[in-house]
Image: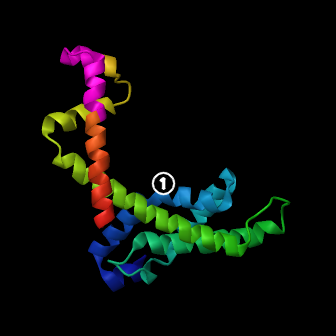
Amino acid sequence: MSGFEDKYGEEHQAEFVANIAGIQRQLHAYIFSLVRHREDTEDVLQETNYVLWRRAETYTPGTNFRAWAYKVAQLQVMAYRKKKYKLSEREWFDSDLIEALAEESLAKADYLDARHEALSTCLQALPQERRQLVAKRYTPGVSVNAMAEELGKPPKAVSETLRRIRHVLMKCIKEKTVTA
């Protein structure tokens, strides 16, 4: 990656590494949406990561990393498809469909990111007591009954409070994503 480091410096190299690490789950889901076979997804993801590293100097820091990585992944899906199509009888999507699915996946990813960011903002706007209640409820293994016992309240009251909080959060998220 010396070409990238020479061109952009050490701070951008660290940003690039963080971007690659941070996008792995999304990239896996994106590739899976295009190939629909687990083994093929793993192969394409590995090849995509290799190409991302190899072509790091072609990425411009500050631009949309996910869009760039998804485009690389899309090209890798098409190359993998071309290579594997002759070797197997497995059905593959045609190139036009892969292109359409790729565009749809990127649009959905942006939408989901906006909703996630809105949720974070909306959660921060809640009073601390309510934020703690939500965090506790979504802790693995914690039930409403256990929360009610700890708070000294009936489970129905805790459920109703959580329902109201979710309603406030949904309304807030809707407002934030409509204006975004």
Q: Main secondary structure of the magenta part?
A: helix
Residue 35 occupies which quadrant of the picture?
bottom right
Give the side of residue 42 with respect to residue 167, left or right.
right
User: Residue drawn 77% across and 66% down?
Assistant: 84
Task: Identify which residue, 57 or 122, lies in the foreground.
Answer: 122
Q: Is residue 51 visible?
A: no
Label 1 packing within 10 angstroms: few (<14), some (14-19), many (20+)? few
Q: Amino acid at mark 1?
A: Arg
In the image, residue 154 lies in the stretch drawn in magenta? yes
The x and y percentages for residue 141 are 38, 24
User: Residue drawn 34% across and 84% down?
Assistant: 6
Task: Identify which residue, 153 or 48, lies in the foreground.
Answer: 153
Give the side of residue 77 with respect to residue 60, left or right.
right
Please identify the quadrant where the N terminus is shown: bottom left
In the image, residue 135 lies in the stretch drawn in magenta? no
Q: Which residues are magenta?
A: 147-163
Please identify the quadrant where the C terminus is shown: bottom left
Give the side of residue 68 with respect to residue 122, left or right.
right
Q: Is residue 14 above or below residue 36?
A: below
